Image: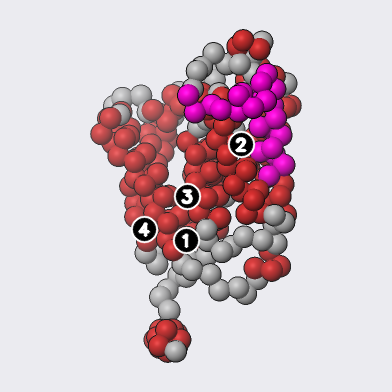
Amino acid sequence: MCLLFDLFQVLRLGIAQDIFRLGKYGGLTAFHDPHLVIHNWWGADAGLIAMGITAACAVMIISGFGARLAILLGVLAYAQLGHHFPPGDRGVDRIIRTGLLVILFSGAVGPWWRLKGKTMPGWPVDLLKFILVMIYLSAGLAKLIQQPGWVSMSAEPPLLRILADPLSGRIDPVFWNDYPWLFRMGSWATIALELSSVLIFTRWCRIWACFGIAMHVGIFATMHLGMFSLGMLSLYPVLLATPLRPASDGADAAMKRDIEE
């Protein structure tokens, strides 16, 4: 659904012909990526065809019908769009493709009513949690080590500069410049949340996820970043499904008995 939303924005803005055509065919893309192979098959309209295939596969994945084939074809076409226009292929696009491949091998593929009550392996959940922890930890460490302004007591808060950027921000810097302390606290809270993402592996996972949801809703409300927040939040049901407390001794005994049987 996030991907369909993003592709719809491309159509709404009328830029599909520009970004999904190579320069020699009248588009804006001047990149030469050796991994871009679809033009060997479909020529000038290859990017637009890949966009259509990606959208069609997204609909099939949502419905659950033919989802395995749709994930394979969809991820391939989606990745080719990324090779076609690298500046438009963001981290969230790679996250969604990775998530789809994890789902492909998880056993959670098909119409939702057929999956209800079905027993599935636990490793896909653990893998998705690990991916999220790596994403947030790397972001937090990058801010802490490479951008010391994020923890400075006197420098202009980076969060204010980002949210007021005319290319991506929504807030008015003239008004909010008088409240730098608010954005300084927001910068510290952002780093604290990202560095504490290891809590995803603990019974505090759901509580941490609530703060993560608040952060991404705030990003969506204050910045123009396409489907970034929506794409990240699409993985949060995995976190919200984590129990608040460990299984009881009785449940552990039942699980041990099932394993022995």
Three-letter amino acid code at disc 3? Gly
Q: Which mark is residue 212?
A: 3
Sequence-wise first label, 3 or 1: 1
Which residue is at a point 52% across and 58% down the rendered structure image? Answer: 105
In the figure, 179 relative to 22: above or below?
Answer: below
Residue type, label 1: Val
Q: How many marks can you see?
A: 4
Of pointers 2 and 3, the one earlier in the residue sequence? 2
State which quadrant residue 56 falls in.
top right
Q: Provide the residue designation for mark 1.
A: 125
Residue 111: image location, x then y, percent: 70, 62
Q: Regarding mark 1 in the picture, which secondary structure is present there?
A: helix
- Give the amino acid at mark 2: Ala
- Give the quarter of the figure containing the N terminus: top right
Image depth: mark 2 or mark 4 in front: 2
**Quadrant position of the C terminus in the picture:** bottom left
In the rendered structure, the answer to whether residue 223 lies left or right of residue 52 reads: left
Residue type, numbered disc 4: Leu
**Mark with earlier residue (1, 2):** 2
First along the sequence among labels 4 and 1: 1
